[in-house]
């Protein structure tokens, strides 16, 4: 079966689409927390 921590963060958006700077900050926090997988643009 599956083990580990999976993260499904909300994707930060702005008027022109994905807020890339905010998204990169979010991804850095998740990787420093050592999550095992990240679901990008996913849904729980």
Image: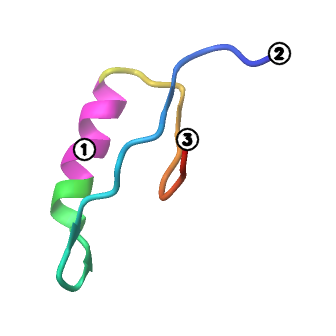
Q: Quadrant of residue 37?
A: top right
Q: Residues within 10 Å of mark 2 (few under 14, many from 20)?
A: few
- Residue in front for this viewpoint, 44 or 3: 44
Q: Residues within 10 Å of mark 3 (few under 14, many from 20)?
A: few
Q: Are marks 2 and 1 in contact (CB under 8 Å)?
A: no
Quadrant occupied by the C terminus: top right
Q: Are marks 1 and 3 in contact (CB under 8 Å)?
A: no
**Distance between the Cα atoms at labels 1 and 3?**
18 Å
Colour setting = rainbow
Q: Which residue is mark 2?
A: 1
Q: Which residues are magenta?
A: 24-32
- Residue in front for this viewpoint, 29 or 15: 15
Where residue 22 sits in the image (x, y, percent)? 17, 56
> Mark 1 or mark 3: which is in front?
3
Q: Is residue 31 above or below residue 33?
A: below
Q: Which residue is mark 3?
A: 44
- Residue in front for this viewpoint, 39 or 28: 39
**Distance between the Cα atoms at labels 2 and 1?**
28 Å
Q: Which residue is mark 1?
A: 26
Q: Are marks 3 and 2 in contact (CB under 8 Å)?
A: no
């Amino acid at each position: 079966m599956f083990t580990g921590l999976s993260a499904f963060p909300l994707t930060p958006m702005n008027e022109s689409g994905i807020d890339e700077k905010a998204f990169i900050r979010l991804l850095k926090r998740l990787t420093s927390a050592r999550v095992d997988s990240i679901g990008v643009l996913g849904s729980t």
